[in-house]
Image (spheres, rainbow, N blue to C red):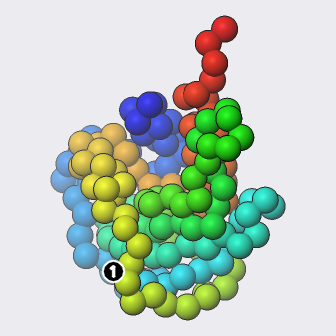
């Protein structure tokens, strides 16, 4: 399931590269975004109170700044059973342009970041191996994509 999700992400992301020299991450260059910022974004209609928290910012030569976010107040179905869903997504990486197309209003700044390291570490390992990139679509579309991918992995056999 994780492999399918990572493979599918390459269709909607930028930065899937096997050239390890080009994929090296570094401290981010200047960005209008800062770690700890909480933003409202163009959400799915069923999640008007969803928000994102910036948990990490890195840079990469061909991608530019990578904005890592934690998403809360969502209702992402994780199974075809309606009672199975997640209210948070612990890690999603985005291009700065995708963030610009997504955010609507800064809501504040948190002093204590939500837990994102497990998702980040999994992504980082795949990114370093050239098997993952960053979303170049809006946050709302990426949440929708993740949900569809999760549900496809839980379809009953026919």
User: Which of the 4 quarters of the picture holds residue 71?
Assistant: bottom right
Within 10 Å of disc 1 (Cα), the crowding (few <14, some 14-19, many 20+) is few
**Left or right: 17 as drawn, with respect to 91:** left
Is 157 above or below relative to 59? Answer: above
Q: Front-most of 86 and 51?
A: 86
**Left or right: 2 as drawn, with respect to 9:** left
**Left or right: 108 as drawn, with respect to 3:** right
Q: Position of residue 44 (x, y in %)?
A: 75, 60
Res. 95 visible in picture: no
Q: Residue furthest top?
A: 158
User: Which of the 4 quarters of the picture holds residue 91?
Assistant: bottom left
Res. 33 visible in picture: yes
Q: Front-most of 18 and 36?
A: 36
Q: Residue furthest front?
A: 83
Identify the residue shown where x is 32% and y is 71%: 58
Q: Position of residue 29 (x, y in %)?
A: 33, 80
For the C terminus, which image quadrant?
Answer: top right
Q: Front-most of 47 and 13?
A: 47
Residue denoted by label 1: 29
Element assignment for label 1: loop
Identify the residue shown where x is 57% and y is 53%: 86
């Amino acid at each position: 399931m994780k492999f399918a999700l990572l493979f599918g992400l390459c269709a909607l992301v930028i930065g899937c590269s096997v050239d390890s020299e080009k994929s090296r991450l570094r401290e981010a260059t200047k960005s209008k975004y800062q770690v700890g910022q909480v933003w409202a974004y163009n959400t799915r209609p069923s999640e008007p109170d969803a928000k994102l928290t910036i948990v990490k910012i890195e840079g990469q030569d061909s991608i530019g700044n990578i904005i890592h976010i934690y998403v809360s107040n969502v209702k992402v179905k994780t199974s075809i059973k309606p009672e199975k869903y997640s209210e948070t997504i612990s890690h999603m990486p985005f291009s700065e342009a995708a963030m610009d197309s997504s955010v609507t209003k800064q809501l504040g700044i948190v002093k204590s970041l939500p837990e994102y390291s497990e998702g980040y570490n999994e992504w980082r390992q795949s990114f370093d191996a050239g098997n993952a990139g960053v979303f170049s679509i809006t946050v709302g579309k990426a949440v929708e994509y993740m949900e569809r991918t999760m549900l496809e992995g839980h379809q009953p056999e026919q």
